[in-house]
Image: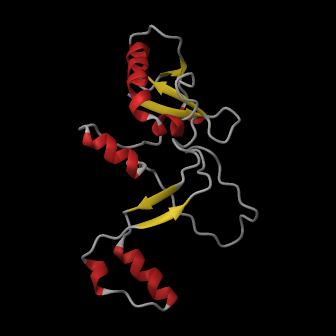
């Protein structure tokens, strides 16, 4: 089952189910208006989304062409994010720039940090800056396996994969 969030003029977008070949999608907002709403009630909603996915792949429900340019980030306003992909060399340079020592344990222990979120740009939306000539540093992210921990634990307990993908 593939899910996406399409732009619809709201901050959270509209939930759709996408065909296996990523060419078509069908509205799923009658089951849950957004992906966040589906995750919040996953035990009840997931079987209906799976059935809708099967119906879409069999051509038995109304469908529209899926255009990745119309997709928002899967969760446009996530409550938080956790990053477990810190590169030690980068951490060392940042700490050195701040005049901070690099703890020896950083070379052996996994590094993770947590951040708050307001809104994520859609994967293909432009980055708007007040002054493009100014010195800015940007870091791109492609969340191929970011989930709410509570949801991931619950889903994994039942032997199913967890993760959200950006297009």
Residue at the outermost top position: 60
Residue 7: x and y in percent read: 63, 34
Q: Residue at x 42, y 42 (%)?
A: 164
Residue at the outermost right position: 130
Q: Residue at x 46, y 35 (%)?
A: 41
Q: Relative to the observer, which residue lies in front, 154 or 161?
A: 154
Q: Residue at x 50, y 86 (%)?
A: 97
Q: Is residue 36 left or right of residue 42?
A: right
On the rendered image, what quadrant is the N terminus found in?
top left
Residue 133: x and y in percent read: 72, 68
Q: Is residue 66 left or right of residue 127?
A: left
Q: Is residue 95 left or right of residue 34?
A: left
Q: Relative to the observer, which residue lies in front, 123 or 115?
A: 115
What is the total number of numbered labels drawn onto the structure image? 0
Residue 128: x and y in percent read: 70, 55
Q: Is residue 156 left or right of residue 64?
A: left
Q: Within the image, what quadrant is residue 65 found in?
A: top right
Residue 80: x and y in percent read: 51, 57
Q: Is residue 134 above or below residue 143?
A: below
Q: How is the image coloured?
A: secondary structure
Q: Residue at x 39, y 52 (%)?
A: 149
Q: Is residue 15 above or below residue 27?
A: below
């Amino acid at each position: 089952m593939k899910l996406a969030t399409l732009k619809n003029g709201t901050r959270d977008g509209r939930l759709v189910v996408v065909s296996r070949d990523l060419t078509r999608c069908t509205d799923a907002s009658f089951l849950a208006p957004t992906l966040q709403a589906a995750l919040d009630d996953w035990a009840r909603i997931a079987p209906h989304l799976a059935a809708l996915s099967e119906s879409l792949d069999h051509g038995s429900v109304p469908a529209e062409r899926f255009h990745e340019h119309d997709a928002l980030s899967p969760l446009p306003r996530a409550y938080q994010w956790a990053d477990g992909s810190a590169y030690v060399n980068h951490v060392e340079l940042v700490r050195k720039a701040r005049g901070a020592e690099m703890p020896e344990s950083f070379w052996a222990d996994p590094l993770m940090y947590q951040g708050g979120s307001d809104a994520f740009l859609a994967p293909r939306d432009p980055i708007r800056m007040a002054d493009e000539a100014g010195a800015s540093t940007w870091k791109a992210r492609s969340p191929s396996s970011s989930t709410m921990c509570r949801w991931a634990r619950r889903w994994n307990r039942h032997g199913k994969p967890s993760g959200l993908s950006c297009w």
